[in-house]
Image: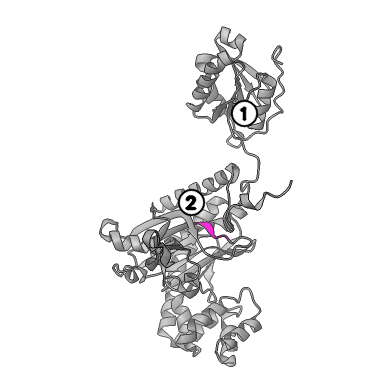
Amino acid sequence: MDPMPTQFDPPSGTRDFLAAEFEARERAFATIRSVFSLYGFEPLQTPAFERLDVLLGKYGDDGDKLIFKILRRGEHEASGEADLALRYDMTVPLARVAAAYGSQLPVPYKRFAIGPVWRADRPGKGRYREFTQCDLDILGSASPLADAEIICAVHDVLSELGVGGFSIQLNSRQVLTGLLSVFGVPAELGAGVLITLDKLDKLPADEVIAELAARGLAPGAAAELVAVVAAPDAGSQVASALKGSDQGTAGLDEVRRILDLAAPLLPPERVGFSPRLVRGLSYYTGPIWEVTAAAVPGSLAGGGRYDHLIEQLGGPDVPAAGGSLGIERILLMLPGSGTERRARLDVAVPVLSEDLAARSFALAAAARAVPLRAGVYLGSSGKLGRQLKWAGDQRARWALICGPAEARAGTVTVRDMVSGEQTAVPAGDIGRHLAQAAASLAPADAGEAAVRDGTDTAAGRA
């Protein structure tokens, strides 16, 4: 098949979701909503775009460059200036809501949000300009219980979705700040040094050392810092190095408290301390964490504490912690991610003649009342064989046939499209019959069984 002409492609970095993939995504989102609700998080929906001044300065210099800006409109259009922007994430809009509606929100405020975000990034494999984020946050609690609860909720979502082989790495920005101080890293080099340290999972140690030196760190200090952070026993080495740093020690205490709360509730070795974990967003102030799996590059989820972000937006100084699922990557790991054939209907209703159309239409309505997905034949052929072929293409489980003989007898022929068996059912009992038939199916079979080719076997119907 020739590739679709370029003019019909969606914009670069975006995607179309046909029914099978869309429904697979919706099932995953339903699971996420269910788990988050079990933990007491409530939904929040914010606009797709925000004022530009709300977003700028919250993501660091690199993040600000990826904000999709919206030019002024109307009489200001000629200025070429932007005043709005598509939302970059769900966290800054949450902070704006908290600043605006603080007195109306419960304390602590536990919310989740699922929706599209936009990044003016270069599209590539697994990198999109429009993608969905699934976030959960707790505002108003400085307790490590909040951080631990978010980590456990994310763990339960991944487990419920069927993701396996993942691990959760935990660190603290205070640990990282303490390390920079202990190794004599100048304050102006700190952010760049952390960005480079974050590459230890991707680059050999000598390349990381060289990059640190290129950033201005003394080669000896760079080598010593990398040796400690990348050591097999990095946790104990970092703890030893931070004995002289009050901030670093406080960060280690944060990590230990969260591990004490979360680790006993999770599978063995599922969560642990990782001193090389950085996370790039500039608003993090305390514990940070990421979820990774050997089967996929990058992280499946991540988050941390951002205690002063709401104050930066003009609201109160409210402690906050949150996390985000990388749902696009997660969906790729799930079995049956939308490429398999799907049943479009549970019940297909042929229309064998114009004078029987109203009866057929009513049969479809009766099936929907069960409730089952039902549709009538909308084509031009009056042949039952061709209409049953249509029912097979829809992967319907049952076909409801009402021809002249059934109309005279006041019955409906219910054809099982898997077995080919046909049963005459009084027209008034069709809803009850379908409900019982659907209830008797195993969950995996309902609406999903492979169907025959629709060839009619009833005498006189060809």
Kind of residue at disc 2: Ile
Most extreme residue toward the left, as rendered? Answer: 103
Please say if 89 is above or below 287: above
Q: How was this image coloured?
A: one colour
Residue 256 on image: x %, y %: 45, 72
Other-residue count near label 2 (Cα within 10 Å), few / some / many at <14 / 14–19 / ≥20: many
Q: Residue 6, how many percent across, how many down? A: 65, 53
Q: CA distance from mark 1 to mark 2?
A: 29 Å
Above or below, 304 relative to 449: below
Specify start and end residues of the magenta stretch as a single range: 128-133
Residue sitting at 40 percent across and 70 percent down?
306
Amino acid type, label 1? Arg
Place residue 141 in its image quadrant: bottom left
Residue appearing at x 48%, y 55% in the figure = 116
Q: Residue furthest top?
A: 408
- What crowding class fits label 1: few (fewer than 14 Cα within 10 Å), some (14-19), or many (20 or more)? many
Residue 304 sits above or below residue 22 on the image: below
Where residue 279 appears, as percent x and y from the top left, is 50, 72
Q: Magenta span: helix, strand or loop, mainly?
A: strand
Which residue was labeled with disc 1?
A: 397
Residue depicted at x 56% and y 45%: 22
- Point 62% across, 28% down: residue: 397
Which secondary structure lies at badge 1?
A: loop
* Residue ID for mark 2: 32
